[in-house]
Amino acid sequence: MQENKMLRRFREGQKLELPEMLSLIVSLALPAIAGQISQVVMEYIDAGMVGHLGAEGSAAIGLVASTTWLIGSLLACAALGFSVQMAQFIGAGQHKKAKNIFYEGLMVILVWSILITVVTVGISGHLPYWLGGTGKAAENGAAYFRIYAMSCPILAINWFGSDMMQSTGNFMIAGVAQILGCMLDVLFNAFLIYPARILSLGTLTVWIPGADLGVTGAALGTLLAQLVSAILLMYVLLFRTSILRWRRGDRFSFRKEDLKRALLIGLPVGVEQTIQMTAQIFLTKIVSPLGTIAIAANSLAVTAEGLCYMPGFGIQTAASTLVGQGIGAKREDLVKKLSMITVGFGMAVMTVTGALMYLFAPWIMAILSSDPSVQQLGAAVLRIEAFAEPLFAAEIVANGVFRGAGDTLVPSIIITVSMWFVRLPLAWFLAPHIGLEGIWTAMAIQLSLQGIVFLLRLRKVDFHKVM
C-alpha cells in the first residue's frame, strides 16, 4: 500500500510550511470524514427504512439506542489504548513493537467483546422495559438489541481494524471499508426489513424478495454489512501492510508495559463513556414520559445530527494520528502548531455543517420519518442543536489531540462533569416545561461550555513535557 508521503516527511523531521501542514491535515481528514459520514448514512438508512414502518418502529430503536452507544464506546475504548501506542511506535520507527501491539490488541479486543456479548444478550429481553418502553415498541426493541449484542465481536474487530489502519497513516483503506459497509447495509436492509413486493418501473415490473423482518431486519442488515467491512480491514492489515502483515514464524508476546499503558489510556475513556452513556440512559427515561412521538423524534434527530458532527470525528482521528506519530518522531516543533490548525479546521467544517443542518432540518426529518408530528418536532430540536456545532467541534478535535498524546484522564473528567452537572439537571428541569426542545437546549448549552473548556486546555498544554 502506498504511504502518505507528507506524513512520512513529518515523521522524518523535514520542515513543513503552512500550506504543506494544511495539505497533510486535509489528506488524512478527508478519507476519515468520508468513512465517518458513511457510518452516519448507514444509521440514516436503518432509521429511515424503519421510520417508514411507523413511529413504533423508530421508538423501538430509540429505546435501546443509548445502550448500543454505550456498548460501542466500550469496544472503541479497548481499541484506543492500543491504537495510540501503534501511532507512537510507527512515528518512532519501532516497527517490531508496532506489530506486537497490533496482535496484543487483537487478542484483547476479542476477549473483551465476547464478555460484553455474554452480558448484553442476558439482559436483552428486559432492557427496553427497564427504560420505560411498553407494548410493541419494547418487544421490537428487545429483538433489535439482542441481535446487536450478538454482533459485538464483529463490531469490535471492525472498530479495531479501522483504528489500527488509521494509526499506520492509511486513512484511505479505512474509509473505503466503511463506505463499502454503508452500501451493503442498503442492500441487506432492502431484503431483510420489508416483505416481498412488486416494483413497477414504467411498463416493467420487478419482483423483489423480502424477509419482512421489520426492526429485526435492520439489525441483521447492519450486522452483515459490518462483517464484510471487518473482513476487508483484517485482510489488508494481516496480508497487505508492510509493517503488520503476518509472516511464517511470527510470534508475539503480551508485554506488561504495553498492556499497562493500554489500560491507562483506554480506562479513563471507558469510564467516561460508561458514565456518559449512563447519563444518556437517564435522558432516555426523561424523554420516555413525553410519549411515542417524542421518543421517535429524539431518536431520529440524534441520527440526523450525526451527519453534522461526524466530520468532526473524522478530523479527530486525523489529529490523533498526527499527534501520536509526531510524539513518536519527537516533532515537538510542529505538534502544537498542527494541533491548533486541526482544531480550527474542525470548527470551520462543523460551522458549515451546522448551518446546513439548520436550513435543511425539515427535509432531513422527512427522509427519516413519514409521520408529520415526528418530522416537525425533530426539525425543531435539530435547529436548537445547530448553534452548538462549532464549539462541539472544538471538543471533538481537541480530544483527538489529547488522545494522540495518551492524555485521556483530564478530558474524560471534563466530559463527565459537564454531562452530569450541566446537561442532566437542565434537561430534568426543562423537559416538563418545554418538552423535548428543553432536553435539546440543555444539550446545546452543555456542549458549548465543554468546547470552551477544551479550547482553554489546548492553549495551555505543553507537548514538550509529553514528549
Image (cartoon, rainbow, N blue to C red):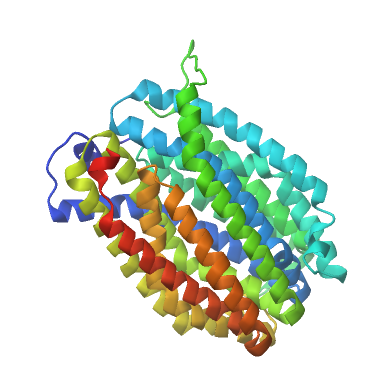
The answer to whether residue 71 is left or right of residue 389 is right
Instruction: Using the image as rendered, state which of residue 79 and residue 29 is in the foreground.
Output: 79
In percent of width and height, residue 169 lies at: 34, 40
| Direction bottom: furthest residue | 433
Instruction: Using the image as rendered, state which of residue 72 and residue 57 is in the foreground.
Output: 72
| Direction top: furthest residue | 249
Query: Height in image: 455 above or below 147?
Result: below
Q: Count all numbered tags in the image, as a single digit.
A: 0
Quadrant in the picture for residue 141? bottom right
Q: Residue at x 59, y 44 (%)?
A: 75
Quadrant in the picture for residue 154? top right
The answer to whether residue 144 is left or right of residue 264 is right
Residue 367 appears in the rendering = no
Instruction: Using the image as rendered, state which of residue 427 and residue 235 is in the foreground.
Output: 427
Residue 241 appears in the rendering = yes
Q: Residue at x 34, y 54 (%)?
A: 29
Quadrant in the picture for residue 214? bottom right
In percent of width and height, residue 171 lies at: 38, 45
Instruction: Using the image as rendered, state which of residue 462 and residue 7 is in the foreground.
Output: 462
In percent of width and height, residue 464 lies at: 23, 42
Q: Residue at x 28, y 27 (%)?
A: 93
In percent of width and height, residue 137 lies at: 81, 69
Quadrant where the C terminus lies? Answer: top left
